[in-house]
C-alpha cells in the first residue's frame, strides 16, 4: 500500500464541502513547495470555503488519495468521480 512521505501532521488545504462530505475529492495538487491541495466538484470557491487540516485527517476522509501519495512536486491528479481511476498530469 502506498503512503505519503510527508508527516501525517502536515497541513493540507481542502474545502468545507469535502470536510462536510458534500463533495468527493476529485482533484489533487502537489505544489512545488510541497504543499498539498484536495478539491471537489465545486467551482468559484471563496476564501472562506477553504480549510486547513492535517494530512491524516484528509486520508481519513478518503483513503483512496493514498493512490496519488507519490505525486511529484507540481503534479496534479484528477478523476471523473470517486469510483474512477486517478489520472496523473505533470504539465
Image (spheres, rainbow, N blue to C red):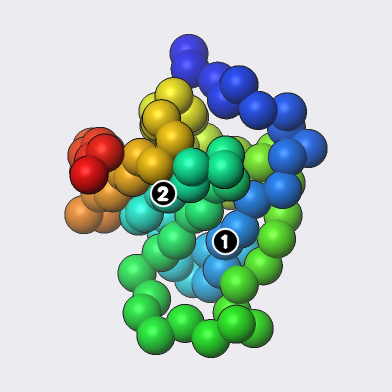
For this rendering, which residue is in front, 48 or 19? 48
> Which of the labelled discs sits on residue 14, or is there none?
1
Q: What residue does disc 2 label?
A: 28
Judged left or right of residue 6, residue 30 is: left
Circle 2 residues within 10 Å: few <14, some 14–19, many ≥20: many
Indicate the position of residue 8 as horizontal and vertical percent values: 73, 32
Marks counted in the figure total: 2
Earlier sequence position, callout 1 versus callout 2: 1
Q: Is residue 31 left or right of residue 56?
A: left
Residue at the image point whose x is 47% and y is 82% from the top: 45
Residue 83, can we see it?
no
70 and 18: which one is in front?
Answer: 70
Q: Look at the image and tell me whether residue 29 can be seen.
A: yes
Q: Which mark is residue 72?
A: none
Q: Position of residue 70 (x, y in %)?
A: 44, 24
- Asked which quadrant contains residue 73, the reply is top left
- Callout 2 secondary element: strand
Residue 85, image x, y percentages:
23, 37
In the image, what residue occupies the spot 56% across and 68% down?
Answer: 15
Amino acid at each position: 500500500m502506498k503512503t505519503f512521505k510527508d508527516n501525517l501532521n502536515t497541513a493540507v488545504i481542502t474545502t468545507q464541502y469535502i470536510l462536510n462530505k458534500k463533495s468527493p475529492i476529485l482533484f489533487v495538487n502537489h505544489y512545488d513547495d510541497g504543499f498539498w491541495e484536495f478539491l471537489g466538484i465545486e467551482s468559484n470557491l471563496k476564501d472562506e470555503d477553504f480549510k486547513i487540516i492535517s494530512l491524516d485527517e484528509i486520508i481519513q476522509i478518503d483513503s483512496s488519495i493514498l493512490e496519488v501519495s507519490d505525486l511529484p512536486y507540481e503534479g496534479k491528479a484528477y478523476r471523473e468521480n470517486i469510483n474512477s481511476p486517478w489520472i496523473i498530469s505533470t504539465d
